[in-house]
Amino acid sequence: TGYEAADGFVVLAGGMAREQETTNCPRYICTIRQSLVDSGVFSVDGDRYHLTQDYSFNSPSQAASVMMARSANGRIEWKDESGRTLKEIQEAVVNDE
């Protein structure tokens, strides 16, 4: 669970992330993930990590990639409770203006 913020995308504490990185996980994403483990922001919970605090990522895609341990388009991966993608929500806001 998360939300867009002025400086990126915030994932809320308690969010679950894949522990094992995929073979195509970009190196910079792996580096971010390791720094989150090292700093205690990610803690091991079975075969997953969970966020111990709210964490702000640079973008929705960076947030999705870190949480999913692979390349990801955050505008498509992040969805609201109705199943609308972040992209659809953003486009609806633009069309309403």
Image (spheres, rainbow, N blue to C red):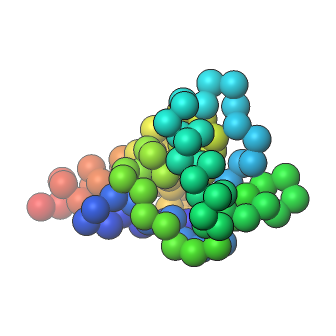
User: Quarter holding the N terminus?
Assistant: bottom right
The single residue placed furthest to the right in the displayed view is 46
The residue lying furthest to the left in this view is: 97
The x and y percentages for residue 69 are: 63, 41
Instruction: Indicate the position of residue 92 as horizontal and vertical percent values.
Output: 27, 55
Residue 10 visible (yes or no): yes
Looking at the image, residue 23 lies above or below residue 83:
above
Query: In this rendering, is residue 95 above or below 29?
Result: below
Residue 72: in sight, yes or no?
no
Is residue 31 shown above or below 13?
above
| Tally of numbered tags | 0
Residue at left 37%, top 51%? 59
- Of residue 24 and residue 43, the one placed in the foreground of this image is 43
Residue under the image location 60 percent in, 64 percent down: 39
Name the residue rendered at 69%, 25% in the picture: 23
Residue 37: horizontal and vertical position, in percent? 66, 57
- Asked whether, in this view, residue 63 is left or right of residue 46, the answer is left
Q: Quadrant of residue 48?
A: bottom right
Quadrant of the image for the C terminus?
Answer: bottom left
User: Which quarter of the figure has residue 25?
Assistant: top right
Residue projecting furthest to the front: 38
- Residue 90, image x, y percentages: 29, 54
Q: Between 15 and 89, which is closer to the camera in this rendering?
A: 15
